[in-house]
Amino acid sequence: MLNLTPDAQVALRAARRRGALEVAPVHLPVGVAGDCNHYGWPIATMAGDTIVVMHRRIPGHNPARAGGPDPTMSYGIVLRSEDGGRTWHGPYDLRDCMKPDDRNRGGIVPLSHRFKFDKGNDSTQGYKVHLHAIGTTRDGGVVAINNHGVFRSDDAGRTWNHFSTALRDDMFPHELVNIGPRILDDPQHGLLVFGNWFGINETKLREEGPPTQFVVLRSPDGGATWQVEDHPAGFVQYEPAAIFHDGRFLLVTREQTDVRSHKQIAWQPGQAPRVIDTNLEDPRYVDTVDFSFNPVTKRFEIVRSERYRMELWLWSLAPDEWDSGQWRRECRLLGTEGEFYNTADGFHPAGAVIDEKRGVQHIFIYSGRPGGPAGVFRITRTLDTRTLSLSLVSSAQN
């Protein structure tokens, strides 16, 4: 399912010998019955020393090449690791902690994906969420949001509870919201999730165009209820990856008008976002990034797909150069075979985690075919970016 190119295999072997990079499977659809054999869009958080990963289990990415939904379809499969990602406990389907009436509210396929996998279903019931987010609270809890609603674990992902009414159609008087991968817990403002409106109303889209608001969801009570703040962003932005750094909320988001670049956003509660253009441009097929501050290099770093040629790259930027939007390309982490959305599928490196104690970052991606099968993989790389880059470049030269 990973299907690395020959030169990427050589680079990986060399970097692994130097202890700079490791790739390993996390969850593969081995022996799964039915069409829901596409495991994708993994995101993660750390609660203490435990890594918690959440991903989808669906028929596919490209519906023309996928099968149909069945009762195993889920947008909230979680696994956890207590040994740095070497072994995993689970999987656990978050729907199993839901009440029966909530689990299939409006149908097996969640509200936001009926346009793709259940086109004859006109029900407006369900949870008004597209995609997903995860984060660790200041008191050690793990909160996860996906197409089935909002979930919380207070024992590092061993057991879960579902907030039945949070973001549900009858309790959330707003459009569907498309969210970025990270939940932040701010001492003053509570839980924060960032995204954009995603209402699937073809008439409104034709008359008004796609929504351009920057949307912030805020929960003052640990995930049970959510308030909304939105501001014009001036462009169609999707799935912003967020961090809090030096007193500001900073984000890197997809520019979704042409799906060919990323932009930066700086935001403060109650204020309009400040948008910065970047040099992060591709011919097509931009993906959601992971965005972090590397405690070793003291630089911002993003892990970014170049899916038009099925590659995964690491970029960096000094914090005092934030306003320039000019990122430095560090090294290629992976290269895989195939044509995106046709013969190959994958990446979505958003929601990576930094294990500062071990000196590594764990990046979670998916890889496979657009109609399935596809599986979830872990890329663990040293936080010493210079060593990582030299390991990968020297192997390519040799």
Image (cartoon, rainbow, N blue to C red):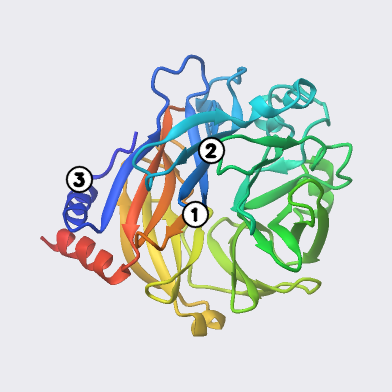
Left or right of 266 in this view: 348: left
Q: Residue furthest bottom?
A: 320
Q: x, y (%) of residue 41?
A: 52, 42
| Quarter containing the N terminus | top left
Helix, strand or loop at label 3? It is helix
Find the distance from the CA under tag 2 to the CA under tag 3.
28 Å
Which label was assigned to residue 390? none
Find the distance from the CA under tag 2 to the CA under tag 1.
24 Å
User: Circle 2 sits on which residue?
Assistant: 55
Q: x, y (%) of residue 132?
A: 63, 45
Q: x, y (%) of residue 346?
A: 44, 42
Q: Residue furthest left?
A: 398
- Front of the two marks 1 and 3: 3
Find the distance from the CA under tag 1 to the CA under tag 3.
24 Å
Q: Residues within 10 Å of mark 1 (few under 14, many from 20)?
A: some
Left or right of 365 in this view: 172: right
Q: Residue at x 79, y 42 (%)?
A: 167
Label 3 sits on what residue type? Answer: Pro
User: Circle 1 sits on which residue?
Assistant: 284
Label 2 sits on what residue type? Answer: His
Compare marks 1 and 3 and give the one earlier in the sequence: 3
- Front of the two marks 2 and 1: 2
Image quadrant where residue 98 sits: top right
Q: Residue at x 82, y 46 (%)?
A: 175
User: Circle 3 sits on which residue?
Assistant: 6
